[in-house]
Amino acid sequence: MSEVTDLLLQYVGYETTSQEDSQSYPSTPGQLVLLRLLLAQLQELGLEADMDQYGYVTATVPTNRATPQPAVCLIAHVDTSPAVSGKDVKPRVVAYRGGDVPLGNGYVLSPADYPHLNDYIGQHLVVTDGSTLLGADDKAGVAEIMAAVRYLLAHPEVPRPTLKIAFTPDEEVGMGVAHFDVAKFGADFGYTVDGGKLGEINYECFNAAQVKVIVTGKSIHPGDAYGKMVNAIDVFCEFHAALPEGERPATTYGYKGFYMADVMEGSVDEATAKYILRDHDKGLLEAKKDYVRQIADRLNAKYGAGTVVLEIRDQYANMSFAAAEHPALVDNARRAFTAAGVEPFVQPIRGGTDGASLTYRGLPCFNLSTGGHNFHGRFEYIPVESMEKMVQVLVGLVGLFVR
């Protein structure tokens, strides 16, 4: 197997599921275990590498040019989504000949459900056993960056600028760079390696907000409830039913935003839920926030003040403004993919990356593919050949910034 494949198979063996509402940072201790391994691997390569109090692992690959060079960064996150278990991941590599791939545990990866599988007939796929996600989001990005660094160090004849590396925790719960010291990191611009299909370039993402809905009911024996009970579950159901049915993730695509119920629990006495609101257009996201407030106001008028309380917080913003300011980031990404024999394509992200927050904080940082598919689920897979191409792309890309 190739070096990048070996690295991915090693990294997915670490349980690094992040956890929302954790009081620690990183949110789960398993992330630190993998981050310490990455620190050790970077130091073994002879690099100046460090892990700070928040778990951020950073390293510098010095330029091999005699003249001053820009500092280009490559960033990936180590945590995996809490949507599906990331414990005891059992990956395997299958030679794909077409048709269904039995994963195990009764699950089947099928081109009937995922037609893009047909693009990889004759290639090798890293898949799960159906009991967990794979974790290629974003351990494939970590592996690709690490493999590219190893290649550059082993081939000093390949021109390179100053290269800044960062591996981050908690991206999946929206806290990936919450404590990241941009000034200390010292990069001028760069890329996160956290995308999907090979060739993808992202410089547009959602504007994002989270809404916590807290419904307070009035519990009383159901035999004596007439005119007295306010069932918090019923009120929450009214809230949810008032949201536009056609503006949910399963019914939207492209630039259209959505409302999504993410977590819900409750009883007659109290119900709580978390929603994520998304839109590429900032004004439309603000309209979504206003709409959930209007629903809450109507329910409070019906059931009493304070029955429904909303806590709304912004999570990240669209980084599209930076594309006009830094056209070389897109142009060079296109050139690097093309030189590696890959057709590049620009795609708006229906999500976000660490790069979106970094861009707003003065570090322009667009997103590139890892090559993976079906992230955050049991049917996640990534072609070995796509990972190998991404290593080639990264090596070529950073060289394009050499002056």
Image (cartoon, grey):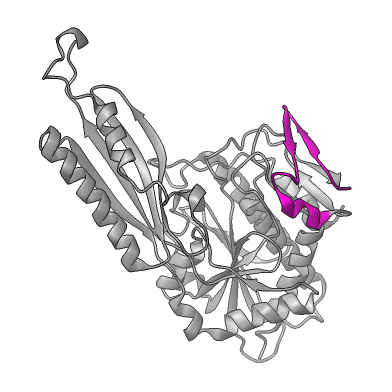
Is residue 22 positioned above or below 268 on the image?
below
Specify start and end residues of the magenta stretch as a single range.
Answer: 96-120
In the displayed structure image, the side of residue 336 where residue 162 appears, left or right:
left
Please say whether residue 136 is one of the residues in the magenta stretch: no
In the displayed structure image, the side of residue 401 where residue 203 appears, left or right:
left
Numbered label tally: 0
Residue 399: quarter of image: bottom right
Is residue 154 positioned above or below 178 on the image?
below
In the displayed structure image, the side of residue 136 where residue 269 appears, left or right:
left
Name the foreground residue: 46 vs 372. Answer: 372
In the displayed structure image, the side of residue 112 where residue 222 appears, left or right:
left
x then y, percent, for residue 402 = 67, 87
Q: Residue at x 16, y 14 (%)?
A: 225
The residue most toward the top is 223
Name the foreground residue: 373 vs 82. Answer: 373
Which quadrant holds the C terminus? bottom right
x then y, percent, for residue 266 = 32, 26
Is residue 203 positioned above or below 138 on the image?
below
x then y, percent, for residue 33 = 60, 43
Please say whether residue 103 is one of the residues in the magenta stretch: yes
Name the foreground residue: 123 vs 245. Answer: 245
Name the foreground residue: 201 vs 188. Answer: 201
x then y, percent, for residue 168 = 54, 56
The answer, for residue 63, to whether it is visible in the render is no
Q: Residue at x 16, y 23 (%)?
A: 218
The answer, for residue 376, to whether it is visible in the render is yes
Q: Residue at x 36, y 29 (%)?
A: 265
